[in-house]
Image: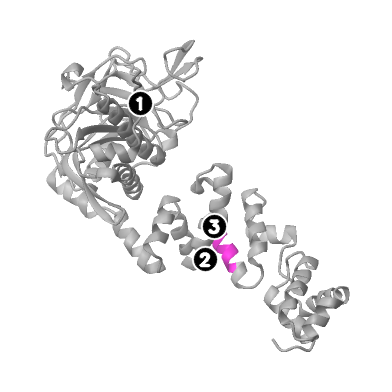
Amino acid sequence: MTTTRSVMPFDEALERFEPVLGLETHVELGTESKMFCGCPTAFGAPPNTQVCPVCLALPGALPVANDQAIESTIRIGLALNCTIAEWCRFARKNYFYPDMPKNYQISQYDEPLCTDGHLDVEVDGRTVRVEIERVHLEEDTGKSTHVGGATGRIHGADYSIVDYNRAGIPLVEIVTRPIAGTDRLAPEVARAYVTELRELMRSLGVSDVRMEQGSLRCDVNVSLMPRGAAEWGTRTETKNVNSLRSVERAVRGEIERQAAVLADGGRIVQETRHFHEDTGATTSGRSKEEAQDYRYFPEPDLLPIAPAPEWVEELRARLPELPTARRRRLQAEWGVSDLDMAAMRNADAVDLVEATVAAGAPAADARKWWMGELARRANESGTALADLPIEPGQIARVVELVASGALTDKLARQVLEGLLAGEGSPDEIVEARGLRVVSDEGELIAIIDQVLAANTDAADKVRAGKVAAAGALVGGVMKASRGKADAARARELILQRLGVAG
């Protein structure tokens, strides 16, 4: 009896097939009001409280385009090396979803605002140029929640509820051209591209790009073709992947799934698919529509957009330092290796380290605390590093206290614990917890004498020349002082008291 494999091991899949990627990334812009009305856009408001006749599509309500959203889209296009259209217009994309009040979406079709760009990403020591086909501006949909059932999908749910707060928020869609030739680096290239894109949006200040809140979402297109074939295979589109790790897993999972289907003589169906965070697998969604299925036509209620070339050049001149150049500058300033910079970037710590350095800490110390103790605590709590309730200026003060000798590293970790618990400033925590290093030499000598009297065997060994035995005595001093003694100074004084040269 023949059995059909659900997946093919990744290495085997790449021996037989070549992957081609395409990435469609949606970025919610951080404007104060929606794309075509004046409703606020703050995340987390009670359901259906940030709506009006325009974004609810009530009869007679007409849209007016948000000029800040248009400017932000042009800045994104410029940062992605795109050509900015001298004239373009919005279109209606017709389809029925319950989370789209109008039953159509105002988007752009054959006349996007930005075209023909690229973004370079570094993967495994190789530079991959990802070509951008288009950057266009549209409005976001509302959010449907399906209640009941095991999957959170509409199938099997008891009922569905809709929140229209998100409907109408400005949304930029960035569409790549097919990305071929990445071979077994395909999953990493996809992740690196979305990572670089996220950093670019942050540097431009156009979005908070919080994937967990949906302000950055990625649709992952994957197709396979047999090695040596001339035509690309049929693609699938995995919708709304909402973490960097999941982008990588979605690509890998689709390569393994499609390879198994093709190897067993099956056919890949052009469709959307759902990504499952718990397993890394995808499941079928719906057949993928072609452009004609959406019945695009020009939006009659909005004027065309005609950015003046002089204004576009003014925006270009005002672009901030872009992420790649910034990382190179910081790496040189901080004197860190490529691996160290990659680790900080993967931990989302570059901004935090930079802000801590700006607050007065040496780069090595700033990196040490963010990538060490704080990264450990973030991992333990399942929290993003930037979401820890601690500020770079507070870390800079802790570094200063350690450098002055007021704290040891061990005591500094207790201060961090207090900061995370909201106990006040570093100095307030030091005082409240009594953490300051014992700096009075008379007090330290008194502690040492107590430890020597209680550990005569170890003291005799040191007097006899076994200086290594002083380690146990230093440990006793640290214990007696509750970690507040300077260990190096304690060792010096112990050897002095025992008449032994260090």
Which residue is most to the front? 1
For disc 2, the marked residue is: 365
Q: Residues within 10 Å of mark 2 (few under 14, many from 20)?
A: many
Which residues are the magenta region? 393-400
Residue 330, percent across and down? 37, 63
Labels 3 and 2 touching (C-beta < 8 A): no
Q: Secondary structure at mark 3?
A: helix
- Looking at the image, residue 59 sits to the left or right of residue 308; the answer is right
* Residue 89 at x, y percent in the picture: 16, 29
Reading the image, the residue beneath label 3 is 372
The image quadrant that residue 198 belongs to is top left
- The numbered mark at residue 474 is none
Residue 125 coordinates in the image, percent (x, y): 29, 57
Q: Is residue 262 visible?
A: yes
Q: Nearer the viewer, residue 502 or 267?
A: 267
Would you place residue 454 above or below residue 356 in this image?
below
Question: Distance between the Cα atoms at labels 3 and 1?
Answer: 43 Å
The amino acid marked with disc number 1 is Arg
- Which residue appears at 21% of the width and 54% of the height? 317
Say what secondary structure mark 1 lies in: loop
Magenta stretch: helix, strand or loop mostly: helix
The reply to whether callout 1 and callout 2 are in contact (CB within 8 Å) is no
What's under tag 2, amino acid-wise? Asp
Q: Residues within 10 Å of mark 3 (few under 14, many from 20)?
A: few
Q: Quadrant of residue 60?
A: top left
Mark 3 vs mark 1: give the one in front.
1
The kind of residue tagged 3 is Gly
Q: Is residue 474 magenta?
A: no
The tag earlier along the polypeptide, 3 or 2, is 2
Quadrant including the C terminus: bottom right
- Disc 1 target residue: 5
Task: Name which quarter of the figure residue 456 lies in.
Answer: bottom right
